[in-house]
Amino acid sequence: MGSLSPWHILIVGLLLAVLFGGRGKLSSFMGDAAKGIRAFKDGLKDPAETPPAQPVQTLPRVDEKDTVAH
């Protein structure tokens, strides 16, 4: 139990390669995780806390009597 077998070394090596293998992999992974957590928190917010939506403005209706005949 006290010694490192080749399997232990292989697993530790793979973990190090995944975490520090490429430039920006770890930081991009952490950024994606933070975005997911932020989206989850926003989804849990009470709807009463969110600002009300702006009402949609409608255009005036044009009747046939208002159009010009060509």
Image: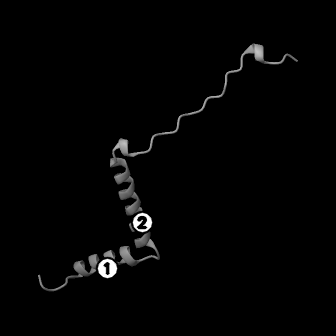
Identity of the residue furthest to the right in this view: 70
Mark 2–mark 1 distance (CA, rounded to whole Å): 24 Å
Quarter of the view holding residue 9: bottom left
Query: Which sits in the foreground, 3 or 53?
Result: 53
Left or right: where does residue 66 sit relative to residue 20?
Answer: right
Residue on which the image places disc 1: 13
Write down the residue under mark 2: 31
The quarter of the image holding the N terminus is bottom left
Disc number placed over residue 59 in the picture, else none: none
Percent from the top left, x then y, of residue 39? Answer: 39, 53
Q: Is residue 7 left or right of residue 69?
A: left
The three-letter amino acid code for the residue at tag 2 is: Gly
Left or right of 44 on screen, residue 25: right
What's under tag 1, amino acid-wise? Gly
Q: Where in the figure is residue 17, as x and y percent of width and height?
A: 37, 77
Query: In the image, which is nearer the foreground, mark 2 or mark 1?
Result: 2
Image quarter where the C terminus lies is top right
* Residue 33 picture location, percent across and down: 37, 62
